[in-house]
Image: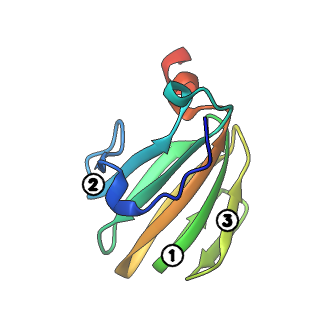
Amino acid sequence: MTIRKIAITDVALERSPGQDGDVFAGNAVDQRHGGPITIGYGRYAPNQDLVETIAVDDVMVVLQGRLSVSTEAETVTAGPSEIVYMPKGESVTIHSHEEGAITAFVTYPHWQEAEAEH
């Protein structure tokens, strides 16, 4: 794999697996490219909730809008240029605020492979 510049227009955003809400994700780099990580984008419509147990270590960078990430113990809210780290095994609810949100994410290892193992 060589260096690449990636834009949100380079990925096909699809509804997040197992979710009914207006939350979409698209991978730009994943196991098909031979790297050890997955890199992509997410798009959250206003006032959406994504509930999941994190299958791999996940880093989310908020590019536009705001998100709150809640666990049983705490809630953090992040806006543009802020990063949320979600460790493997954590049960979270990701909530988009009234303006929705655009995010970039990096996971280690590949989240699709971890999801397939369940």
Mark 1 vs 2: CB contact within 8 A: no
Element type at mark 3: strand
Residue annotated with mark 3:
84
Instruction: Pinpoint residue 54: horizontal percent, then vertical percent.
Output: 61, 41
Label 3 to label 1, Cα distance in Å?
A: 12 Å
Locate residue 22: give its quadrant: bottom left
Instruction: Pinpoint residue 16: horizontal percent, then vertical percent.
Output: 36, 44
Residue at 60% x, 78% y is 78
- Describe residue 45's horizontal placement relative to residue 95 as left or right: left
Element type at mark 1: strand
Disc ID at residue 79: none
Residue at 39% x, 47% y is 26
What kind of residue is marked 3?
A: Val
What kind of residue is marked 2?
A: Gly
> Residue most toward the front?
2
- Describe residue 25's horizontal placement relative to residue 4 as left or right: left
Q: Quadrant of the N terminus?
A: top right
Which is more foreground, mark 1 or mark 2?
1
Element type at mark 2: loop
Residue annotated with mark 2:
21
Is 49 located above or below residue 62 in the figure?
A: above
Residue at 30% x, 50% y is 13
Label 3 to label 2, Cα distance in Å?
A: 21 Å
Residue at 55% x, 15% y is 117
Which is more foreground, mark 3 or mark 2?
3
Counting residues from the start of the chain, the first of labels 3 and 2 encountered is: 2
Instruction: Pinpoint residue 41: horizontal percent, then vertical percent.
Output: 45, 57
